[in-house]
Amino acid sequence: MGMNESEPVAPGSVSPQVLVLNFEPIVQSRGDRPLREVLGWNDPHMLTDGYVADLAECSRGYVRYQVVDWRDVDAYPVKQDGFRYTDRSYLACCEEGEPWHRPDAVDYQRILLDFRIPARVERGEIDEVWLWGFPYAGFWESTMAGQGAYFCNSPPVEGIPTSRPFVTMGFNYERGVGPMLESFGHRVESILRHVYGSWEPAETHAWNRFTLYDQIAPGRAGCGNVHFSPNSLRDYDWGNRRTVWSTCDDWLNYPHLSGERRRVNCKDWGGGDIRAHHRWWLRHLPHAPGRSEGKLNNWWVYAIDLNR
């Protein structure tokens, strides 16, 4: 399995093995067509290919995801309170303005146990689970389960009997690859906050310095975070034309930082395009061998291999 190598002295590569559960109800009243086709949404196979390719490129070949099992599930997943949409009730929400069910959250424990995922994780068959679904499927962007699991942009799933933690990603085929990278970026943020012990607008450690942006640290912006580019004034403000000082280029040389700054604005990360910004941010994650401040210099190891 791709995740069982010893700690590398150079970035190398890992090949996490993925189980995809594609919740794609077949709507009998609409010619036995998949829900996504009925409503004009995207092909999850194409989106998955784009996501895998982007992460391989952004990690400089370190992350080479392998989808080893793809299951198309003709069902609506069950919510935590036991509710399950039907074709009729779901289409009424989409097309007739009926209210969406609340609470929205899906029953993760039921999904993971119904598909016997803990046993497959224990046998080393899979390292991650990716859930595909529709709007209001109730998926978190990412969540963690198993022994040692912690907050990963959502509380960990309780009651999953594995001896190691693993991540389950939640994707929406109404949207594109950009939001998938956003989900991964928030996963990175949660994991690195856990690794460094804090995340705050200070210069106390590398993760804090990397994520500074001008609004909270005037003249001292690093690369910002998933929602805030170096010059952003509000969430998702990736198209801001304001020019600010940033050390973003310096982070490509981590841990050998010189403090060099230059003036940047949205032209540097795609002019407001969500996918372009997130690719830019992920490409700036440190990726060197060795350790600094007691932490690995390759932050992709933390984001991908939870058990190293």
Image: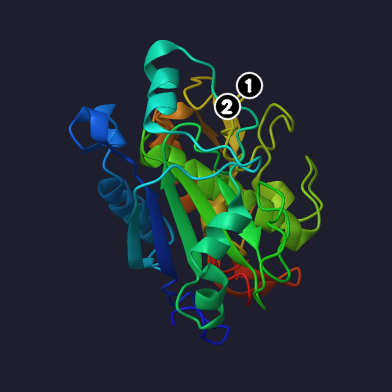
Q: Where residue 152 is drawn, which disc sits there?
A: none
Q: Is residue 291 above or below residue 191?
A: below
Nearer to the camera, 19 or 222: 19
Q: Could you tell me which residue is drawn at 34 percent across and 41 percent down?
A: 25
Q: Is residue 226 left or right of residue 269?
A: right
Q: Where residue 233 is drawn, which disc sits there?
A: 1
Residue placed furthest toward the left = 31
Nearer to the camera, 53 or 164: 164
Residue pointed to by mark 2: 101
Q: Could you tell me which residue is drawn at 56 percent across and 33 percent down?
A: 229
Q: Could you tell me which residue is drawn at 81 percent across and 58 percent down?
A: 197
Q: Given the image, on which type of amino acid does mark 2 rest? A: His
Across and down, in percent, residue 283 comes to: 46, 52
Secondary structure beneath label 2 = loop
**Image quadrant where one finds the C terminus:** bottom right
Q: Is residue 23 left or right of residue 138?
A: left
From this viewpoint, is residue 12 visible? yes
Nearer to the camera, 179 or 212: 179
Within the image, what quadrant is residue 279 found in?
Answer: top left
